[in-house]
Amino acid sequence: MKCKSYLKKSINVGIIGMGAITDFYLKALSKNQFFNLVAVCDIDFNKINKYKGQIDLVTRDVNDVLNSKKVDAIIVNLPNDLHYKTCMKAIKKRIHVCCEKPLVKSRCQVKRLIKEAKKKNVVLQTAFHRRYNKNIYHLMKKMRNSINNHNYPISVKVRYLENIKEHCFENSWYLENTSSPVGAIFDNGPNAIDVVRYLVGDIEIYESYINHEIIGLETKAVIKARTQLIPEIEIQLDWEYQHGECKDVFVKFHDGKNCYCNMLSGFTKFKSSLFHEYIGVLNDFKKNIIQMKRIGSIENTYDISGQVVVEDISLVGSISKKTPRYPWGGNDAVAETQRE
Ligand SMILES: NC(=O)c1ccc[n+]([C@@H]2O[C@H](COP(=O)([O-])OP(=O)(O)OC[C@H]3O[C@@H](n4cnc5c(N)ncnc54)[C@H](O)[C@@H]3O)[C@@H](O)[C@H]2O)c1
């Protein structure tokens, strides 16, 4: 059978922002023949110098990438406050976008980006990397096998606990609390909420406990949510967890049985699970671009790209005015981690 032209042609991609997360993209790109890396951009010379002579366009100016006729798609790995402006400019130039989470900081910005992407027929995707985690995938399969007319999940708990200082450089924008939306909710919320949505579908967030009145300065949060079928969903976020990393999911079923998934199981080296997760991110980006080229329709692409999750996060923001409270203890979390 003959290959369609949109499947044969590789896509020229540029990476904007060559910081901590970029290595995982570079590794994933090296394993993905669909994408051809043609541009790298970082304001910091030290991060791009080594690519000179190897990659066509090496620049400190984002506009050089966006104005390049060669670039079909970009990966946005910039500090959070630069996502909106960069994504909007790219979309206006009909460049497909895979942007790191959190895509943007408000519902209004999400809507504007989606509207423009639909108008220009380009993919706009958030890199929710945990949904490609193999342990999450196995949990999803286990859940599907356990669900029947008489048995269904009655509660889901996701814990996303880490010490942010172990995940970024000293003096990083993560710790500055300036213009970039940061904090446990903006930083970890998107992945944790996306995992829940991936497993159980749309959720309604009805309550939250946050340890700072100003969103962006919180380091701990507990978010309560539900679906039509599942009354109890809890998402725990911690940015100053002192016991390493704990990223897991507990599912309780009506028949009394439980499913447990440690996202980091099998990945003993710090951050090593990200390698296979970003292969998944790029595979989805490829799938979405092909779909866009093939049917010109974008509804499904937006579903896959999980835009609504970003809206969930702004929803969380809107309930942050509730009395700050932190209802669970660090020791409790450690004890539960041993359960696997
Ligand atoms: N580090 C992680 O573990 C991780 C995991 C998942 C998602 N993310 C997301 O990835 C994004 C990037 O995070 P990071 O940890 O790689 O941050 P980082 O600070 O390590 O990298 C950001 C890079 O952007 C560059 N930059 C800043 N302003 C620029 C500009 N105007 N033009 C060009 N380059 C500019 C910086 O020099 C830096 O190299 C964030 O949205 C973050 O939430 C990070």
Image (cartoon, rainbow, N blue to C red):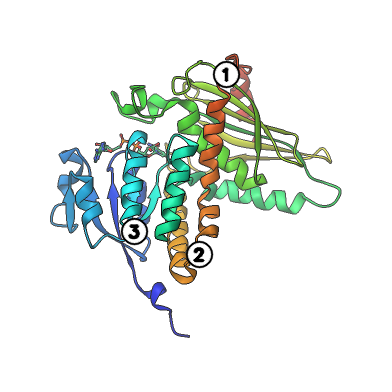
Residue 244 to residue 254: above or below? above
Dot label at residue 330: 1
- Graded by Cα atoms within 10 Å as few (under 14), some (14 to 19) or many (20 or more), the crowding at tag 3 reads many
At label 2, the amino acid type is: Ser
**Can you see residue 250?**
yes
Disc 1 and disc 3: Cα gap in Å?
Answer: 47 Å
Q: Nearer the viewer, mark 2 or mark 1?
A: 2
114 with respect to 70 (left or right)? right
Label whose residue precedes the other's in the sequence (1 or 3): 3
Question: SS of the residue at dot 2?
Answer: loop
Q: Residue 204's quadrant in the figure?
A: top right
The answer to whether mark 2 and mark 1 are in CB contact below 8 A is: no
337 with respect to 143 (left or right)? left
Q: Going 72% across and 52% down the picture, which residue do you hit? A: 144
Position of residue 113 measured from the top left corner of the image (x, y, whole percent) = 42, 47
Question: SS of the residue at dot 1?
Answer: helix
At label 3, the amino acid type is: Arg
Dot label at residue 6: none
Residue under label 3, please give it.
94
At label 1, the amino acid type is: Gly
Q: Quadrant of the C terminus?
A: top right
Residue under label 2, please give it.
297
Q: Going 56% across and 18% down the picture, which residue do you hit? A: 321
Label whose residue precedes the other's in the sequence (3 or 2): 3
